[in-house]
Image (cartoon, grey):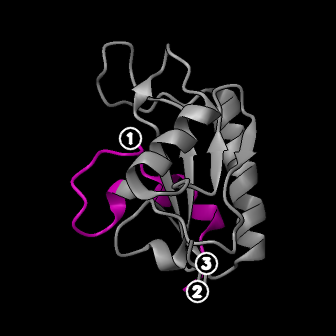
């Protein structure tokens, strides 16, 4: 695992699992290890609002090609509706926990911009199925 150089971005993702089926912490970690040799994200926000720390903030994640060296990755459980279609499936508990986590992280990293994976250049995915840069505009740096 590589050390994280600096935190310029906080990137939000969804697991892309059906919202009516749980996706365990163990499954999330195993997927990252199978694909990249390590856990992909720094934080996991479960449907009940629990925030699970996964990687230390000082360690580079593997969640956004070309941006891993300067970003923290947060992933929420869900992202697909019951039929398997991409959708913002965050529960009220997840929305609250995400906001509180982002508030704490932006206090620690005041220059970091909040973005969704889909908002990065050259990303064709719908992940996380909403626009974090807009939803969390009040937490964005003033520049």
- Label 2: which secondary element: loop
What whole-number distance in Å separates the C-alpha atoms at marks 2 and 1? 28 Å
Task: Tell me if residue 129 is in the magenta stretch.
Answer: yes
Between discs 2 and 3, the one toward the N terminus: 2
Q: Nearer the viewer, mark 2 or mark 1?
A: 2
Question: Is the residue 116 above or below the residue 19 in the image?
Answer: below
Asked if the residue under mark 3 is in contact with the one under mark 1, i.e. CB atoms within 8 Å, the reply is no
Q: Nearer the viewer, residue 139 or 53?
A: 53
Where is residue 50 drawn, in percent x and y? 75, 35
Q: Is residue 44 left or right of residue 129?
A: right
Residue at image mark 3: 141
Question: Is the residue 38 above or below the residue 121 in the image?
Answer: above
- Label 1: which secondary element: loop
Q: Main secondary structure of the magenta part?
A: loop
Where is residue 140 drawn, in percent x and y? 59, 70
Residue 124, picture quadrant: bottom left
Residue at image mark 2: 5
Residue at image mark 1: 129
Q: Nearer the viewer, mark 1 or mark 3?
A: 1
What whole-number distance in Å separates the C-alpha atoms at marks 1 and 3? 23 Å
Where is residue 37 drawn, in percent x and y? 47, 57
Residue 4, picture quadrant: bottom right
């Amino acid at each position: 695992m590589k050390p994280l150089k600096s935190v310029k971005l906080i990137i939000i993702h969804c697991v892309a699992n059906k919202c009516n089926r749980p996706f365990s912490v163990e499954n999330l970690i195993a997927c990252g290890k199978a694909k990249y040799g390590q856990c992909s994200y720094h934080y996991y926000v479960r449907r009940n609002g629990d925030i699970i720390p996964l990687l230390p903030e000082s360690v580079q994640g593997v969640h956004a090609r070309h941006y891993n060296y300067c970003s923290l990755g947060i992933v929420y459980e869900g992202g697909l509706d019951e039929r398997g279609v991409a959708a913002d499936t965050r529960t009220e508990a997840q929305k609250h926990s995400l906001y509180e986590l982002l508030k704490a992280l932006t206090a620690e990293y005041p220059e970091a911009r909040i973005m969704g994976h889909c908002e990065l250049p050259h990303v064709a995915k719908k992940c996380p199925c909403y626009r974090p840069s807009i939803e969390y505009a009040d937490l964005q740096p003033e520049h």
